[in-house]
Image (cartoon, helix red, strand yellow):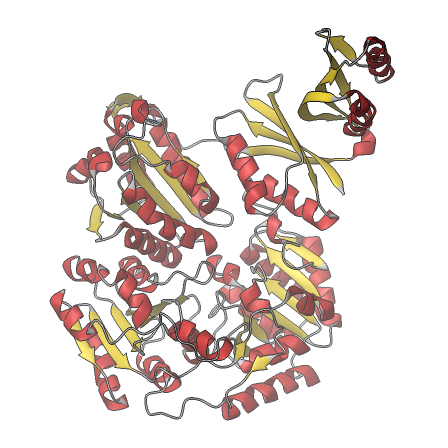
């Protein structure tokens, strides 16, 4: 038991965070969080200054996804708090652990429309896993303890702690206890052996079984277990986009992501399968197309840590609720005990491999010298396998899904749920802070990069050398593609007019800017960036008319793929 | 189907907002709601009635259960549950007979009469939603001046 010590709420907050192992905070100060900022002078937590609070949240998000510990971001009250909302919503949509700490006006000013007052608790409620607003300083140690616990357990998510200014400055005797109780929160379930056994049985009796790996497989880092199940039962593996790289994409059984811009072979095989082992996925519309077409054909085994996901979008014949890593481990053990090991290739696996080989050979890519496929394959060729890749949102993101193979599981991250443009660059900075020894690349488009490009200041001044890899078509490319496809080429609001010049922009921040207009220049630029000790922006002009294909139009099923002609 | 949900929550400010917000955000509708503290002041109980198919009701129960502030969420079987709603009707009296007629009607439904005036009378009725609706139909010809209704309060029968 710790002995009580009298201190301010601000100091208690920082002390509690140090106890949680927090090493850095991404943030921006303002009137209502100054007492907490003053504590940076008296503790070992590093402060990483951002130029916009949204980026602080994305950095904390990137840090959290890579380290699987909550990243922490700070913002002041009012506009500071509303600015981080997009970042919080992004983390919630992708189940990323995060602690967002906002300043708030003093308790007696709440509700008076005070300067820089916003009801951030009310606004954030729909997009957080939980929100706290301690009303007295003495509550803070417990609030922080509970906040971290909620953020990182079960299905992870962002937790908001909104701290009124007087709660930061008031003193109270503080008790930092390890034990606490949250009555309505039960993040753990015991392994579900009975349903895992049923699942094995269903998979063994299926003619065309397949694994669908979702983001949950990455969050729980069930990589070894997933691979063991796939190899033992000879199951082909597709993923959702968020599950991309849960399974090595260079593995013979890997087919890559399904979905709106899934790999042709993955979508084909998904539509032919008769039984799916779905691991940590919510069957999003972008992944499965129309729900009805998907479930009509398929027997579904659904593993998920969140019971509310079972039956939400897709009915399952067998549900296995709990941490997917734990339940997959049970599956591996049972397979071992039962001495089940498939070695010969079934007609299904043979067919899958043939289909995969066919599409590897026959998928038409952009004929130009600087097509997206060639550019991203070059990046893959030159990046060490442990490198971390984040992406922005748009065409480049889907090209990354199609043409950048993840070799080492858990090294690819994207804003997949909310689809937040501007996420990739600050998230890359957060990822680099979590893993400073590996190269971190943000695969970007010009439209998205523009949204958080001022994070270059953070990358340079805080010495966080990430690489921004801009596929620059000077267009909001995905919107342009939809306008070409569905609006008879009526292009509205998509032209970027090559503004700004990203090389000069990078240089003006003290970063390195390189333009690569040929594959040769690209080769040199990537090698240069990898050896650079300063953040580098590689600007790669590409054809604005290049579409992302294959394409499953919204509201249709995976069998209705539009293919390159 | 019509469903009665009984939700035990921690008795803290802001939870009613979160629960009702969940219904809105997940595209469900609240038909009626009643909230009150339990015998233990640390908790309050919300009784929410809603409409939806079986899958939707299952989903809303799961989403409510997932909320950290909810302690227990139950979908009550209406056949194994005592559920009542309180309603107060202000009914117009147009002629001398009306008062007696309304009194008779109120008696038939186990209602109580209040605030008897020359032109109006109030009837307090504690009954199931269907019974209240039936009473309302019969009271309509007199002229209903105003109505106030609580949501449903419900408890599962013992051993059910």
From this view, report whether residue B97 is shown above or below residue A491: above
Quarter where residue A428 is shown: bottom left
In the image, what residue occupies the spot 31% across and 22% down?
A: A108
Task: Name which quarter of the figure residue A36 lies in.
Answer: top left
Give the tally of numbered discs: 0
Q: Position of residue A502 (x, y in %)?
A: 20, 73
Residue reaching furthest to the front: B95
Question: Does the rendering let one see residue A407?
Answer: no
Give the percent coordinates (x, y) of residue A51.
21, 53
Front residue of B92/A270: it is B92
Compared to A235, does A175 lie above or below? Answer: above
Viewport quadrant of the N terminus of chain A: top left
Residue A559 drawn at (x, y percent): 63, 78
Between A395 and A6, the one nearer to me in the picture: A395
Where residue A376 appears, x then y in whole percent?
A: 36, 81
- Residue drawn 21% across the image and 75% down it: A529
Q: Residue at x 22, y 46 (%)?
A: A28
Classify residue A523 as left or right of residue A180: left
In front of the other: A133 or A349: A133
Q: Is residue A130 left or right of residue A300?
A: left
> At x 71% / y 6%, what residue is drawn?
B117
In the picture provided, is A110 more to the left or to the right than B131? left
Can residue A469 be seen here? yes
Q: Nearer the viewer, residue A101 or A120?
A: A120
């Amino acid at each position: 038991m710790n002995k009580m010590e009298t201190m301010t709420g601000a100091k208690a907050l920082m002390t509690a965070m140090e106890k949680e192992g927090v090493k850095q905070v991404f943030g921006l100060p303002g009137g209502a969080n100054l007492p907490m900022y003053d504590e940076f002078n008296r503790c070992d937590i590093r402060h990483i200054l951002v130029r916009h609070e949204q980026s602080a949240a994305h950095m904390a998000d990137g840090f959290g996804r890579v380290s699987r510990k909550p990243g922490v971001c700070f913002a002041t009250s009012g506009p500071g708090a509303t600015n981080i909302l997009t970042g919080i919503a992004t983390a919630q949509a992708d189940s990323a652990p995060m602690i967002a700490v906002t300043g708030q006006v003093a308790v007696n000013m709440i509700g008076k429309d005070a300067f820089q007052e916003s009801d951030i608790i009310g606004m954030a409620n729909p997009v957080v896993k939980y929100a706290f607003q301690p009303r007295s300083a003495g509550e803070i140690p417990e609030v922080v303890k509970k906040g971290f616990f909620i953020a990182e357990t079960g299905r992870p998510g962002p937790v908001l702690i909104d701290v009124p200014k007087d709660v930061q400055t008031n003193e109270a005797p503080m008790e930092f206890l390890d034990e606490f109780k949250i009555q309505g929160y039960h993040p753990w379930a015991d392994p579900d052996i009975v349903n895992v056994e049923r699942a094995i049985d269903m998979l063994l009796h299926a003619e065309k079984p397949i694994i669908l790996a979702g983001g949950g497989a990455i969050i729980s880092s069930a990589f070894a277990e997933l691979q063991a199940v796939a190899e033992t039962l000879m199951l082909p593996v597709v993923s959702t986009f968020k599950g991309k790289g849960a399974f090595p994409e260079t593995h013979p059984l890997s087919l890559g992501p399904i979905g709106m811009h899934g790999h042709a072979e993955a979508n084909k095989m998904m539509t032919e399968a008769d039984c799916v082992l779905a691991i940590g996925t919510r069957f999003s519309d972008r992944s499965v197309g129309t729900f009805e077409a998907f479930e009509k054909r398929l027997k579904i085994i659904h593993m998920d840590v969140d019971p509310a996901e079972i039956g939400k979008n897709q009915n399952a014949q067998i549900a296995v609720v709990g941490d997917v890593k734990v339940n997959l481990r049970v599956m591996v053990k049972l397979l071992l005990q039962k001495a089940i090991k498939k070695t010969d290739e079934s007609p299904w696996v043979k067919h899958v491999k043939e289909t995969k080989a066919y599409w590897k050979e026959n998928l038409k890519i952009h004929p130009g010298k600087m097509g997206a496929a060639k550019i991203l394959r070059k990046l893959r060729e030159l990046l060490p396998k442990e490198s971390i890749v984040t992406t922005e949102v748009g065409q480049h993101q889907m090209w990354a899904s199609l043409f950048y193979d993840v070799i080492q599981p858990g090294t690819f991250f994207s804003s997949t749920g909310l689809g937040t443009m501007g996420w990739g660059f600050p998230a890359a900075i957060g990822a680099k802070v979590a893993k400073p020894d590996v190269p971190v690349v943000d695969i970007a488009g010009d439209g998205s990069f523009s949204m958080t490009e001022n994070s270059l200041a953070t990358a340079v001044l805080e010495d966080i050398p990430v690489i921004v890899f801009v596929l620059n078509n000077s267009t909001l490319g995905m919107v342009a593609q939809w306008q070409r496809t569905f609006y008879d080429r009526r292009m509205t609001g998509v032209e970027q007019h090559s503004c700004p010049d990203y090389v000069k922009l990078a240089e003006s921040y003290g970063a390195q800017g390189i333009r690569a207009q040929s594959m040769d220049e690209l080769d040199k630029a990537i090698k240069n960036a990898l050896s650079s000790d300063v953040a580098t922006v590689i600007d790669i002009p590409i054809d604005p008319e290049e579409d992302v294909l294959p394409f499953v139009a919204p509201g249709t099923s995976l069998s209705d793929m539009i293919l390159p002609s | 189907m019509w469903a009665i949900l009984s939700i035990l929550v921690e008795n803290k400010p802001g939870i009613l907002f979160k629960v009702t917000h969940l219904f809105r955000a997940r595209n469900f509708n609240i038909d009626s709601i009643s909230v009150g503290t339990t015998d233990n002041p640390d908790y309050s109980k919300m009784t929410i009635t809603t409409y939806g198919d079986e899958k939707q009701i299952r989903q809303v129960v799961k989403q409510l259960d997932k909320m950290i502030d909810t302690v227990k969420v139950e979908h009550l079987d209406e056949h194994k549950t005592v559920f009542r709603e309180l309603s107060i009707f202000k009914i117009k009296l147009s002629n001398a007979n009306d008062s007696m007629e309304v009194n008779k009607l109120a008696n038939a439904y186990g209602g109580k009469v209040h605030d008897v005036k020359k032109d109006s009378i109030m009837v307090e009725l504690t009954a199931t939603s269907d019974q209240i609706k039936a009473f309302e139909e019969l009271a309509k010809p007199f002229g209903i001046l105003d109505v106030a209704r609580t949501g449903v309060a419900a408890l599962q029968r013992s051993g059910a």
